Image (cartoon, grey):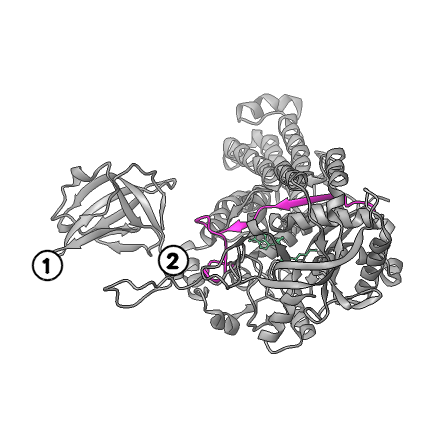
Amino acid sequence: MKTFYVTTPIYYANSLPHLGHLYTMVVADAVARSKRQQGIETFFLTGTDEHGINIERAAQKNGRTPQEQADYVVSYFKKMTAAFGLDTAHGGYDIFMRTTEPFHSEGLSELWRRVAKAKTPKGNDALYKGHYEGWFCAPCADYKTEDEYAKPENAGDPPNCLIHETKLDRVSEESYFFRLSDYDEALLGLYESRADFVRPEARRNEVKSFVAGGLRDLSVSRLRTSVSWGVPVPGDPNHTMYVWFDALTNYITAIGFGNEQQERQLGFEKFWPALHLMGKDILRFHAVYWPAFLMAAGVEQPRAIVAHGMWVDPTGRKMSKTLGNTIELDVLNKFFPIDTIRYFVLREMVFGQDGRFGYENLIDRTNSDLASGLGNLSSRTLTMIHRYSEGRIPDGTIADENRLAAKRAGVDDETAISDFISHARDEFLRYFADLAFSRALEEAWGVVARADKMISDAKPWELAKDASQRQTLNAVLYRAAESLRWLAAMLYPVMPTSANEIYQQLGLGNGVSKINPTHLRWGELGPGTQIQEVKPLFPRIDKAKTMDEIKKQEPGPGSQERREQRSEVSSQRSAERGSSATVREGVADSAQGSGQHTTEADAVPGVASYIEITDFAKIDLRVAEVKTAERIPKADKLLLLTVDIGEEKPRTILAGIAQYYEPENLVGRKIVVVANLKPRKLRGYESQGMLLAASVGDEGKPVIATFAEDVPNGARLK
Ligand code: MSP
């Protein structure tokens, strides 16, 4: 029996999950569903990383014990995964792994003992006791070398982590070391012999050059007096195991390595090796440290280490709580059906590269690809079957004598569409297996477009008026319905609820999760099948209204309190939801890249009150080129401009400069525009931004801000 094992990282139990965490879970969930659909027994792991100084500090800050802190975050995670249909009850993960489980400590201790006995490939002891002197970043749970931190402004202060911009801890203590420096050649050999071990290619190259640059031995324990919240080193309880050694090992203890409990229930041999999915932020731990630990312990290497990119905001900035641009799961859950979020993240992020996440893009894609695309294809097809075929799937065969008439009506031989769709299915599966979800979905949407075009060209509503075209009409309806059946089976791993809904509406019941898309054969949709009531799959989202409501919800930078009061995974919507989970929390910053931005209020004469740099960062200033400019009848102060700020379409802007500038002198000028100002209606025109100008003299004469050098349209000012 073939098996498959897929993992997400286990997330730090110091803070609540956000879009980034959700994303890796959605990817793993889609992979697991696709494997299961193909009849492969699959094990999907996610969970929490609960030991270490990070959790200890969050607990302290929240007035809890570390265990209470971990339990608290886990309860939120579980409600969140249930609300997003990712838990076991909804066909998602098989285990929610927790490193505070006793079976984990047992297996972890076994791994340590094995490593402690091991020799490196160069014949030295893999583990030795020494003294560590250096800097440690608690949020990264990582030791930092000189090129990985920023020197402090005041000599004597600790340096800052380049990722988190938080102060590093000085560590000077006895420590066990893992002799990583002896594993360089072995690791390079592994990357060489297994070209798809670290993926994608660009990441593999990064890892290779990191290792080729030489490895330093790794401190793998802390004194119990410095970090007490962790698993003691076997035989030396004054030491606590390093949190990454502890965390990575979860992937094997979960299925039974070194502990009977999980081994009996699941079986290490049965599921190992795993495909590890993670963000590129933690690739090094997975692609360098983890394989080296496994080599030392004599355990088989993972199936693959696959790193995806990070979600950034629509303007390309890293998401962080300080900037107030994180995507909160409770907001997402409240305003968007799960399947639209799943579709969006898998379609939008080219796997391996960073992706931009904005609610507006999510709404646009939902409306275009789902409401007008797949949803519309499904409802128009089913509605026509109700109307023209009494709600039963018609027989789609065209007798020889009717072929010519069908051709005249623009309806080809059936093989044209069946060949097209089976090729698209093959491509879809190939891309999906390569984790190129975006490409895979493009293939599927090629099928949507093909079926839509067939309907629009053939015009069933016209065919229905001509009795001699009955077979042509039936053929069109059959082909559209059969295309939908294929699409439902292909798309199930991406959009489980909607795929099932399509399948049900086609009269095929509840079992799309068991339809192996590789086995689909054209024509297996049975004529005579009674279809069900047509229900809209993806209602259109009113962009302006939804954006307004979302803005009311969004916590600004630093307004953690508002989030605490509001924070609620509002469950029960699309899937069969459990009870709604109310969560309030004040938690430490997560590893999403949050940092303590310092106030940049250096004394500036004449400025009455200071703003934080984060307030300034909220203003999206862009270089714009004036494309057209004209006066507005009966408005002597206003000019109507269209400006190009590097977007698909130019924007319209109204500016109160008509008394000072001739429109024709403005065309071609590069100006500065506030791009994220709420659009406003003036004199019947929508002004989608504001230009910047100095206000000069008593009468406030506007002088437009401009550039001395050439600058590209859309460039950001900061
Ligand atoms: N506890 C460690 C992992 C141990 S695994 C043995 C950890 N936890 S974390 O809570 O910081 O989660 C990091 C992971 O969350 C990333 O690798 C990625 O999977 C996901 N993401 C967090 N922020 C993200 C984005 N902004 N974008 C995409 N994924 C992100 O590291």
Whether label 1 lies within 8 Å of ligand 1 gets the answer: no
Where does residue 705 sit, x and y in percent of width and height? 23, 47
Quarter of the rendering containing residue 411: top right
Instruction: Say above or below: 624 vs 150.
Output: above
Going from N to C along the chain, the mark reached first, 1 or 2, is 2
Where does residue 379 sit, x and y in percent of width and height? 56, 47
Instruction: Say above or below: 461 vs 64.
Output: above
Q: Tell which of 182 and 204 is nearer to you.
A: 182
Instruction: Say above or below: 93 vs 202.
Output: below
Q: Around disc 1, counting alpha carbons within 10 Å, would you say few (fewer than 14), some (14 to 19), or many (20 or more)?
A: few
Q: Amino acid at mark 1?
A: Asp
Residue in the picture at 53% in, 23% down: 408
- Tag 1 residue: 698
Q: Tell which of 684 and 30 is nearer to you.
A: 30
Q: Tell which of 385 and 328 is nearer to you.
A: 328
Q: Quadrant of the N terminus?
A: top right
Secondary element under disc 2, as helix, strand or loop, is loop
Q: Amino acid at mark 2?
A: Lys
Q: Is residue 532 visible?
A: no
Residue 359, magenta (yes or no): no
Circles 1 and 2, Cβ within 8 Å, touching? The answer is no
- Tag 2 residue: 618
Q: Main secondary structure of the magenta part?
A: loop
Q: Which residues are magenta?
A: 300-327
Secondary element under disc 1, as helix, strand or loop, is loop
